[in-house]
Image: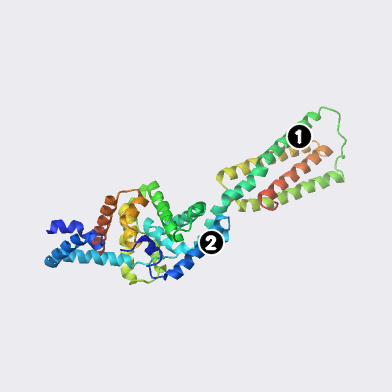
């Protein structure tokens, strides 16, 4: 066997993938050829070095949390979105319709009023601020959970909350014109309560 | 040469009885995990993460990417647990899946062919067990990481992990001849780089 015939087979020879007859031919050549023998020795040394490399290496941080989050993400997203997403949007739409209905009602008979500067009116303003503070706190809890949601789910949350905020703005705008209106004040509280309910669900505080 | 199954038992030095017990324990954990028991899957993760990470690190040559690949591989394993029937060790089932995840990522990011070995990557190898001289090991790891992706994958799978060419061909989608050619190329390049 010549060097030209031996060298292309050295990998298989070192890996013991040649049959016995071929291996013996190579061994005979290596016994007689210093250059090919050195080549085989260098190859064998490299293979042995590779085999001695550590088989385990610890990652620089615990990767489990990220894995667990990814595993749980679809189920949690489904739990969060299937029951309430469309009902929240429907509720927000109903609120806007109610505001529109109320505006239309302005052309009808005058509603009974609390009277300007009444205690009930001041209490209503205080309740409005309390609900806003509670909503802000809940929103912080919701935002903390955002990382576990898909971008689509996050966009749908934002859209739902935007619609509810729009309804609140519309009601407040009407209240600025009719601050003593009992029906507008009731509507404001009702929307606040609905927003709190939605945020509590999103924050995982309810089943 | 070592077969992949032998390689999976950390060098083939674990007694058969112990291996059977380990396999039985893993089968129990996998069965529980398949029914949604996350704690059971975490136990499997803790047992295998170092092997999986080492494989991902060497296939990608990048420490941060290896962390992502490790996470992706375990998430994929969770989804495919129904396919593990306990006929082999969990690692024998898991490692080809890890290779698929790592190679699929490589195919999607061809631009990383010319890989740069980062300082952070070198530090990662300090966390490995000291099986050989640290300086020598680092030289080899650096040289392996500098290989072209295809040659690196075959070298890692064949010479480090102990897979046969037919197993590599099946995992990587190339022919046995291509696998052998890539291994020859990798060894040539490594010898040149380690000699310089």
The residue most toward the top is A107
Colour scheme of this structure image?
Answer: rainbow
Decide if residue A45 is in sight here: yes
Q: Residues within 10 Å of mark 1 (few under 14, many from 20)?
A: some
Frontmost of labels 2 and 1 is 2
Label total for image: 2
Label 2 marks a residue whose chain is: B
For the residue pair B180 and A17, the one nearer the viewer reads as A17
Label 1 marks a residue whose chain is: A
Q: How crowded is mark 2: few (under 14 residues within 10 Å), some or many (20 or more)?
A: some
Is disc 1 placed on a helix, strand or loop?
A: helix
Spot occupied by residue B176 in the image (x, y as percentages of width and height): 29, 51
Residue carrying label 1? A98
- What residue appears at the point 40 percent right and 46 percent down from the top-left corner? B108
Decide if residue A60 is in sight here: no
Residue carrying label 2? B29
Report the side of A8 relative to B76 (left or right): left
Which of the numbered marks, if any, corresponds to residue B154?
A: none
- What residue appears at the point 24 percent right and 65 percent down from the top-left corner? A44
Spot occupied by residue B23 in the image (x, y as percentages of width and height): 47, 64
Question: Which quadrant holds residue B121?
Answer: bottom left
Question: Which quadrant holds residue A81?
Answer: top right
Whether callout 2 and callout 1 share a subunit is answered no
Spot occupied by residue B124 in the image (x, y as percentages of width and height): 41, 64
- What residue appears at the point 48 percent right and 52 percent down from the top-left corner? B83
Is disc 2 placed on a helix, strand or loop?
A: helix
């Amino acid at each position: 066997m010549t060097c030209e015939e031996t060298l292309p087979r050295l990998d298989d020879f070192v890996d013991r993938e040649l049959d016995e007859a071929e291996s013996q031919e190579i061994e005979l050549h290596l016994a007689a050829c210093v250059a090919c023998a050195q080549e085989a020795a260098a190859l064998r040394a490299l293979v042995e070095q590779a085999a001695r490399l550590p088989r385990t290496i610890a990652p620089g941080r615990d990767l489990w949390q990220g894995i667990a989050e990814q595993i749980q993400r679809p189920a949690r997203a489904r739990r969060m979105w299937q029951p309430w997403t469309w009902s929240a949007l429907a509720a927000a739409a109903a609120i806007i319709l109610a505001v529109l209905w109320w505006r239309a009602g302005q052309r009808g008979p005058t509603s009974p009023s609390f009277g300007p500067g009444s205690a009930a009116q001041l209490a209503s303003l205080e309740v409005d601020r309390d609900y806003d503070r509670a909503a802000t706190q809940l929103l912080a809890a919701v935002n903390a959970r955002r990382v576990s949601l898909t971008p689509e789910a996050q966009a749908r949350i934002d859209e739902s909350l935007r619609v509810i905020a729009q309804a609140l703005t519309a009601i407040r705008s009407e209240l600025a014109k009719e601050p003593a209106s009992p029906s507008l004040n009731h509507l404001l509280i009702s929307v606040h309560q609905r927003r709190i309910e939605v945020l509590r669900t999103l924050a995982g505080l309810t089943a | 040469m070592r077969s992949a199954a032998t390689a999976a038992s950390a060098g083939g030095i674990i007694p058969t009885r112990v291996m059977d017990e380990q396999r039985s324990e893993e089968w129990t954990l996998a069965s529980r995990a398949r029914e949604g028991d996350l704690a059971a899957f975490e136990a499997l993760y803790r047992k295998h993460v170092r092997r999986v990470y080492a494989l991902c690190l060497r296939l990608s040559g990048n420490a941060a990417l290896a962390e992502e690949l490790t996470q992706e591989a375990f998430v994929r394993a969770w989804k495919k647990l129904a396919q593990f029937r306990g006929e082999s060790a969990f690692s024998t089932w898991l490692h080809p899946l890890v290779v698929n995840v790592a190679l699929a990522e490589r195919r999607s990011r061809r631009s990383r062919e010319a890989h740069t070995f980062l300082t952070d990557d070198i530090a990662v190898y300090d966390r490995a067990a000291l099986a050989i001289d640290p300086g020598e090991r680092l030289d080899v790891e650096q040289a392996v990481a500098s290989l072209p992706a295809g040659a690196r994958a075959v070298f890692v799978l064949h010479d480090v992990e102990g897979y046969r060419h037919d197993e590599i061909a099946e995992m990587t989608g190339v022919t046995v001849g291509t696998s052998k050619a890539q291994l020859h190329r990798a060894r040539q390049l490594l010898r040149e780089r380690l000699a310089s």
